[in-house]
């Protein structure tokens, strides 16, 4: 009697390891601490230092500029030194700087701490993004990055809600110490993450532009920058646009719907990315956002005809934006990583994040200037529609073929 031969099925590489869970939770908690302060800092500056609106804008922008400035250098640092040590050091500094806010009696000192916080945040987020790539199976990288990003989306939804609740019932110091507490728990979880040993380079590599910015990612970065411009406009000016349309309440609902769209789309888009459909996922995502921004720009004439239809479309837009951008985030992130050799992963992550930050910054300036010149934000969102259309052209015509030709895995 002959024994029947059996062939085991190819098992899927495990994604939900302890290390992956810990890094996702650490990411959620550091982002939660960040978003906890976001809505109350303007109020704190006005009430504590009697700062003007202009000064508040300058102080808040210092954080973004500092994070943007450090990203290319953080990629170099993380590709040169032990990534986990850099991650833990910057994570700890991120928590410690919160104490500076509570003890700053001079606004100049507060600005200094804000700049330091931006520098540290730009490094720790690049480190976290690189480490999750290191510990995620390459065959499930898109899925892993999708879940990792969900942690950020959840913190974006929960952090501001808790902050505004605490603002009505507790002191600013209580909010700062709450951020410190969440950050400390995140740091403990970050310490538990085990990362693979980084191979030691036998020869010192020469300093070049590619050590700070992934040259193969420039074309993709350009298309991503155009996509970030209207996103920056939306997060900053949508409440004002709602007032122009007579929608004075429920702005929290807009961001909740958008967060839900981001989370839901990440659940399936990452798996499509892992099946090799990166160009398709990005193209579909951009197409959805183009429709969303065109509808958004058309709400003003619609509102003059029928306010109910305008209201329904106004809250349909964040669902489209959430799904569209949620599809693109893990796909773009994977695209940059797949263009880089293993010893340039952090540089790839920093290039991805830098391209996004530059677009957000342009959107903040452009949206306000267009609205000031035209006395309406509708034209700003039409500019957003054009910006994403340009992004689709650049991606389809140049970035996608370049990626397919140059990808390493």
Image: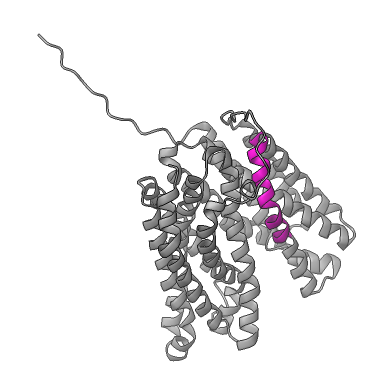
Q: Return the x and y of residue 85 as percentages of the image width and height.
A: 68, 34
| 23 in relation to 280, above or below | above
Q: Is residue 292 above or below residue 334?
A: below
Residue nearest the viewer, comparing 23 with 131: 131
Q: Quick one: which residue is furthest to the right in this view?
A: 106
Left or right relative to 295: residue 201: right
User: In the image, residue 279 lies at what x, y percent?
Assistant: 39, 56
Q: Give the residue at x 40% y 67%.
A: 288
Q: Position of residue 161 (x, y in %)?
A: 61, 59
Q: Quadrant of residue 35?
A: bottom right
Work out which residue is located at the far bottom of the displayed protein and give it. Answer: 305
Main structural element of the magenta stretch: helix, strand or loop?
A: helix
Asked if residue 5 can be seen in this view, the reply is yes
**Residue at (70%, 52%) from the top-left corner?**
70
Q: Which residue is outermost to the left?
A: 1
Tell me residue 203's x, y (percent).
Answer: 65, 31
> Which of 268/134 is in front?
134
What residue lies at 73% left-to-right and 57% top-to-bottom? 66
Q: Where 183 sits versus 220, above or below? A: above
Query: Which region of the structure is painted magenta?
Result: 63-83
Q: Residue at x 83, y 51 (%)?
A: 100
């Amino acid at each position: 009697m002959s024994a029947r031969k059996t062939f085991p099925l190819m098992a899927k590489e495990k994604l939900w390891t302890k290390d992956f869970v810990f890094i996702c939770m650490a990411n959620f908690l550091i982002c939660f601490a960040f978003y906890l302060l976001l809505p109350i800092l303007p109020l704190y500056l006005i009430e504590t230092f009697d700062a003007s609106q202009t000064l508040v804008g300058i102080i808040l922008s210092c954080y973004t500029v500092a994070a943007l400035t450090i990203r290319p250098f953080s990629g170099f640092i993380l590709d040169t030194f032990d990534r986990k040590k850099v991650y833990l050091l910057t994570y700890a500094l991120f928590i410690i700087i919160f104490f500076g806010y509570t003890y700053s009696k001079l606004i100049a000192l507060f600005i200094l701490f804000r700049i330091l916080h931006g520098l540290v945040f730009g490094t720790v987020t690049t480190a976290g993004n690189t480490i999750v790539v290191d510990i995620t199976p390459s065959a499930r990288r898109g899925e892993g990055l999708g879940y990792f990003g969900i942690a950020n989306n959840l913190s974006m939804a929960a952090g501001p809600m808790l902050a505004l609740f605490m603002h009505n019932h507790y002191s600013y110091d209580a909010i700062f110490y709450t951020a410190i507490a969440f950050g400390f728990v995140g740091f403990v979880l970050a310490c538990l993450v085990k990362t693979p040993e980084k191979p030691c380079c036998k020869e010192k590599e020469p300093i070049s532009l590619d050590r700070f910015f992934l040259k193969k990612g420039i074309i993709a970065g350009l298309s991503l920058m155009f996509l970030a411009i209207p996103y920056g406009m939306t997060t900053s000016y949508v409440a004002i646009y709602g007032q122009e349309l007579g929608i004075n309440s429920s702005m929290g609902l807009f961001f909740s719907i958008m967060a839900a769209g981001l989370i839901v789309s990440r659940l399936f888009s990452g798996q499509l990315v892992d099946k090799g459909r990166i160009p398709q996922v990005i193209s579909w995502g951009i197409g959805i956002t183009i429709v969303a921004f065109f509808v958004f720009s058309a709400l003003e004439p619609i509102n003059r005809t029928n306010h109910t239809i305008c209201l329904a479309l106004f809250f349909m837009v964040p669902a489209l934006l959430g799904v569209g951008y949620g599809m693109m985030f893990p796909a773009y992130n994977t695209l940059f990583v797949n263009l880089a050799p293993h010893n340039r992963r952090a540089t790839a992550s920093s290039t991805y994040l830098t391209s996004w930050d530059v677009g957000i910054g342009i959107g903040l300036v452009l949206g306000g200037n267009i609205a000031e010149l035209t006395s309406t934000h509708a034209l700003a969102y039409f500019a957003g529609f054009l910006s994403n259309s340009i992004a689709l052209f650049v991606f389809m015509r140049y970035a996608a073929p370049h990626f397919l030709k140059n990808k390493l895995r």
